[in-house]
């Protein structure tokens, strides 16, 4: 499982990197209409069920900052000025600055984040938010705008925003897994939430009709947090036992889900050759 997950995540990263190069070139050339047509087609595939939440997320990674894309922010600003009614431009701008904020913050939690990094992150996220809300005015079903806002709620520790986006997204997409998983992540203790808040959300989710498979995969996310807690406190044996249960819960999930939301279990566990057993170490 670990090797397969890493391989598929690498393949997705390479594809998104190639797409990002194309988008960067189009931005520099001000070929804004071509980019809008490309992402309108991606959106149409998603709405028609021909593309998954993971496929949609991968497509929008073309607007993530990275090497060779240092001028992307300027290109996005020019796009918004030239085509202020473009929901694609608004989502792209919001996506870029949301990821810029996350990148400058780093990987720490709480007091582990330097004050200067925290301050710059908030400035970047505040650039992103108005355009993401603008995108939803122009296209009320923009799933990527909703996901970006949920990520911002997590990084700003904004419960009110998270609740608002959860309500909005589940009305538009009653079976959304990824936005619910991001909401559940924002409830974890390391992000300022609590075990009780996570459990309450899971109880509510399990009671909703038609969400059995979604609830099972969210249980894997909850389980992963429990394993992480055991591992962090030095209870390695209990952590590995928990991670094994997490991977059983996540069986059949898209590797792009487990690689992000069941991250700690995926790092420690491999599926057996029978496709059923799981070994964790």
Image (cartoon, rainbow, N blue to C red):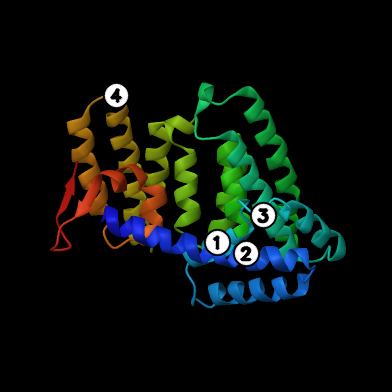
| Residue 10 lies in quadrant | bottom left
Pointer 2 residue = 21
Secondary structure found at label 3 = loop
Which comes before the other along the chain, label 1 or label 3?
A: 1
Residue of label 3: 69
Q: Which of marks 4 and 1 is nearer the N terminus?
A: 1
Q: Residue at x 20, y 46 (%)?
A: 244
Say if mark 2 contacts mark 1, CB within 8 Å.
yes
Depth check, front residue: 277 or 130: 277
In the image, 170 versus 139, the foreground residue is: 139
Residue 55: image location, x then y, percent: 49, 67
Quadrant of the drawing holding the N terminus: bottom left
Residue at figure coordinates x 65%, y 36% from the top left: 121
Side (left or right) of 123 relative to 82: left
Q: How far apart are marks 4 and 3 (CA)?
A: 40 Å
Q: Is residue 52 above or below residue 75?
A: below
The part of the image, by quadrant, that contains residue 177 is bottom left
Q: Dot 2: within a 10 Å radius of its alpha carbon, few (fewer than 14), some, or many (20 or more) residues?
A: some
Q: Residue 221 location, x and y as percent? A: 36, 46
Residue 143, quarter of picture: bottom right
Q: What element carries label 2?
A: helix
Marks 2/3 in contact by CB < 8 Å: the verdict is: no
Mark 4: which secondary structure?
Answer: loop
Residue that mark 1 sits on = 17
Q: Which mark is residue 233?
A: 4
Single out the residue that lies furthest toward the right: 82
Q: Is residue 267 left or right of residue 40?
A: left
Tell me how far mark 4 sits from mark 2, CA to CA.
43 Å
Q: Of the numbered discs in the image, which one, if any, rests on residue 70?
A: none
- CA distance separating discs 4 and 1: 37 Å
Pointers 4 and 2 in contact (CB under 8 A)? Answer: no
Mark 3 crowd level (few <14, some 14–19, many ≥20, 10 Å Cα): some
């Amino acid at each position: 499982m670990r090797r397969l997950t890493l391989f598929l995540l690498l393949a997705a990263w390479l594809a998104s990197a190639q797409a990002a190069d194309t988008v960067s070139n189009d931005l520099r050339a001000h070929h804004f209409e071509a980019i809008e047509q490309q992402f309108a087609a991606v959106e149409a595939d998603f709405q028609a069920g021909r593309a998954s939440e993971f496929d949609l997320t991968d497509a929008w990674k073309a607007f993530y900052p990275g090497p060779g894309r240092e001028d992307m922010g300027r290109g996005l600003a020019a796009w918004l000025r030239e085509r202020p009614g473009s929901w694609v431009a608004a989502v792209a701008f919001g996506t870029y600055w949301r990821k810029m904020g996350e990148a400058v913050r780093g990987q720490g939690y709480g007091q582990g984040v330097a004050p200067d990094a925290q301050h710059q992150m908030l400035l970047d996220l505040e650039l992103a938010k108005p355009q993401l809300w603008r995108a939803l005015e122009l296209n009320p079903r923009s799933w990527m705008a909703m996901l970006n806002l949920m990520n911002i709620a997590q990084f700003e520790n904004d419960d009110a925003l998270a609740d608002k986006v959860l309500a909005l997204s589940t009305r538009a997409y009653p079976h959304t897994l990824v936005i619910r998983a991001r909401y559940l992540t924002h409830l974890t203790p390391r992000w300022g939430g609590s075990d009780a808040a996570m459990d309450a959300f899971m109880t509510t989710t399990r009671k909703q009709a038609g969400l059995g498979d979604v609830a099972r995969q969210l249980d894997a996310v909850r389980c992963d947090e429990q394993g992480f807690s055991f591992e962090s406190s030095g209870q390695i044996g209990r952590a590995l036992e928990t991670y094994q249960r997490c991977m059983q819960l996540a069986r059949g999930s898209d590797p792009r889900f487990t690689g992000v939301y069941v991250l700690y279990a995926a790092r420690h566990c491999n599926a057996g050759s029978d496709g059923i057993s799981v070994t964790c170490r």
